[in-house]
Image (spheres, rainbow, N blue to C red):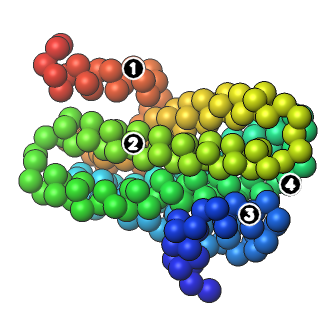
């Protein structure tokens, strides 16, 4: 099975992909292909950002970064399924799993595309705060693109369904996407470090303190010389 070819087919013809998901065509094959590709691409990105610190950090980030996206998916998938069932959806659990894996795959392909850019700055700029903020921007951008894909996919599926209140159902999806983003960002904070910290020994995890949003605010103010 050529997993990469399956992924590229999905990216090139999303309308056919959504039709097949709605008709439950080849769901198991899609799950395996997207899981393999997304985990591999995200692991490569993790390897590159971890290489800014230590070879152990590179290996750790190559493992933890795919874990971040997949654990977020597993944590949020049940709530999505229940919300949709309560609002009248007839789709099954595997269909939602495929849609979320497709979202993760879109994000992973975007991250893969940014690998040369990140590698360039890794080799040419010796500034930890800048490198960290650069990657936060990349993670945010790719996440927004992935979420937009998921929302448009759900919108398309709802438009062809027999749901009587499509507007209400889409509002449920929007609320769930907020939950998905919040869980993902906080989980990323819990699984840190992904970059390592200059002057500190390698650590698989750091003690929990504050939260992701406070840390980014402090990093941004430090980078701008505001503190």
3D distance between C-alphas at marks 2 and 3: 27 Å
Q: Is residue 98 left or right of residue 64?
A: right
| Image mark for residue 92 | 4
| Image mark for residue 214 | 1
Front residue (pair 13, 55): 13
Circle 2 crowding by C-alpha within 10 Å: few under 14, some 14–19, many from 20: some
Q: Is residue 60 left or right of residue 179?
A: left
What is the quadrant of the C terminus in the image? top left
Is there any visible trace of residue 82 in the rendered image? Answer: no
Say if 53 sits above or below 10 in the image.
Answer: above
Q: At 60% across and 58% down in the image, what residue appears?
A: 102
Q: Position of residue 215 (x, y in %)?
A: 36, 25
Give the residue pinned by disc 2: 141
Q: Position of residue 9 (x, y in %)?
A: 56, 74
Q: Specify which label sits upstream in the sequence, 1 or 4.
A: 4
Circle 1 crowding by C-alpha within 10 Å: few under 14, some 14–19, many from 20: few
Q: At 85% across and 52% down in the image, what residue appears?
A: 91
Q: Position of residue 82 (x, y in %)?
A: 84, 39
Check disc 3 and report its element: helix, strand or loop.
Answer: helix
What is the quadrant of the N terminus in the image? bottom right
3D distance between C-alphas at marks 2 and 1: 19 Å
Q: Specify which label sits upstream in the sequence, 2 or 1.
A: 2
Circle 4 crowding by C-alpha within 10 Å: few under 14, some 14–19, many from 20: few
Q: Residue furthest bottom?
A: 1
Circle 3 crowding by C-alpha within 10 Å: few under 14, some 14–19, many from 20: some
Say if 28 sits above or below 68 in the image.
Answer: below
Is there any visible trace of residue 145 in the rendered image? Answer: yes
Q: Are marks 1 and 3 in contact (CB under 8 Å)?
A: no
Q: Specify which label sits upstream in the sequence, 4 or 3.
A: 3
Q: Are marks 4 and 3 in contact (CB under 8 Å)?
A: no
Give the residue pinned by disc 3: 19
């Amino acid at each position: 099975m050529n997993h990469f070819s399956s992924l590229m087919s999905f990216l090139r013809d999303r309308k056919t992909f959504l039709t097949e998901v709605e008709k439950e065509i080849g769901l198991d094959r899609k799950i395996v292909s997207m899981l393999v590709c997304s985990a591999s691409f995200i692991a490569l990105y993790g390897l590159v950002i971890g290489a800014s610190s230590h070879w152990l950090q590179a290996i750790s980030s190559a493992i933890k970064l795919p874990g971040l996206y997949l654990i977020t998916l597993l944590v949020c998938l049940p709530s999505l399924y229940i919300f949709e069932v309560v609002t009248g959806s007839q789709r099954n659990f595997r269909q939602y799993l495929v849609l979320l894996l497709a979202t993760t795959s879109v994000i992973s392909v975007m991250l893969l595309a940014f690998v040369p850019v990140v590698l360039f700055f890794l080799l040419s700029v010796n500034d930890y705060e800048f490198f960290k903020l650069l990657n936060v921007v990349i993670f945010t951008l790719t996440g927004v693109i992935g979420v937009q894909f998921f929302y448009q996919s759900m919108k398309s599926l709802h438009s062809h369904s027999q749901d009587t209140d499509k507007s209400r159902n889409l509002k449920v999806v929007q609320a769930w996407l907020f939950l998905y983003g919040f869980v993902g960002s906080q989980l990323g904070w819990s699984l840190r470090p992904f970059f390592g910290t200059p002057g500190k020994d390698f650590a698989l995890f750091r003690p929990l303190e504050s939260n992701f949003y406070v840390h980014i605010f402090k990093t941004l103010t430090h980078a701008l010389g505001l503190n």
